[in-house]
Amino acid sequence: MDDPYWFGQIAAANALSDVYAMGGEPKTAMNLVAFPLKEMDLSILRQILEGGIEKMKEAGVVLVGGHSIEDSELKYGLSVTGFVHPKRVLLKGGLKSGDRLILTKPLGTGVINTAIKADMATPELTDRVTRLMATLNRDAALIMADFPVHACTDITGFGLLGHLAEMIIGSGFGIMLRAGDIPILPEAITFAGYGLLPAGAFKNKEFRQSMVECAPGMDSLMVDLFFDPQTSGGLLISIAEAHAARLLDSLINKGVTESRIIGEVVAGPGEKIFITQS
């Protein structure tokens, strides 16, 4: 992302997402900045901070300070503090057999960001993906708070399969995914076919491939997209089957329109992710 203002917006949304994924409400934040003073004009930093502040205002978060250093590489993020009742903290390891898995944002931002860097994405696509990454997971978190959710995480740098792997390690459970139900930005499929997969996707695949089993004839390109590292991706929610359809309807009806049920938690064999076509 070359636009400093949107860079700040996306970085802030990404940082706030961790609190939303745990069922919390972010309250305060501190800026964390590393900036190459000798290579970049301070106006760039000003725009980044403005973008972050606007996103914090949208989230109802108060900026209480920050830390900055001079560095050769630009870095910006937030240290966020939030509130959640101790009995309502959501962890990634609370899965139960039979749970349905709901994903609230489509995959593919890593591939499309690679296409943007290669100057292959249209302005319209760039704008859409930028706004998608800058969208807070606040609404999804507020909606799921009214349901008996068992576990939750946000999908970021490890990709969908990497974060699913974290959820089942040590649980004794497995995951059954239906590839056809997983929302993916259509342009990401096209660009991935051109070979525009980010390096992070291959690193994610190398690290977790042993935990993934695919149905015969599964398109390997789609599996690569499931490893695509996301920037400020959606929430992945695990909830009992009896409540899943109602939660999905509520998400869609209240504006989180690209939410989908993508699979389920199965009793075994443990620590395996099975992917079927549909």
Image (cartoon, helix red, strand yellow):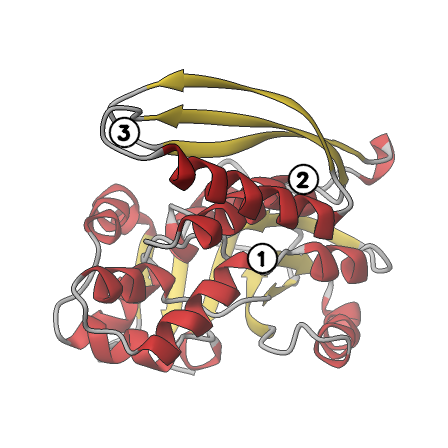
Q: Quadrant of the N terminus?
A: bottom left
Residue 164 visible: no
Q: Nearer the viewer, residue 10 or 256?
A: 10
* Residue carrying label 1: 236
Please provide percent x and percent y for residue 224. Answer: 25, 63
Instruction: Measure the alpha-carbon separation of dots 1 and 3.
Output: 31 Å
Q: Quadrant of residue 267?
A: bottom right
Three-letter amino acid code of the residue under disc 3: Glu
Q: Residue at x 26, y 74 (%)?
A: 121
Instruction: Measure the alpha-carbon separation of dots 2 and 1.
Output: 14 Å
Sequence-first disc among 2 and 3: 2
* Residue carrying label 2: 19
Q: Foreground mark, 2 or 1?
A: 2
* Residue carrying label 3: 73
Please provide percent x and percent y for residue 194. Answer: 13, 74
Q: Residue at x 29, y 78 (%)?
A: 122
Above or below 143: residue 215 = below
Position of residue 65 in the picture relative to residue 208 (left or right): right
Position of residue 200 in the picture relative to residue 262 (left or right): left
Q: Secondary structure at mark 1?
A: strand
Q: Secondary structure at mark 2?
A: helix
Q: Are marks 1 and 3 in contact (CB under 8 Å)?
A: no
Please provide percent x and percent y for residue 243. Answer: 79, 69
Q: Quadrant of the C terminus?
A: bottom left
Q: Foreground mark, 2 or 3?
A: 3
Three-letter amino acid code of the residue under disc 2: Val
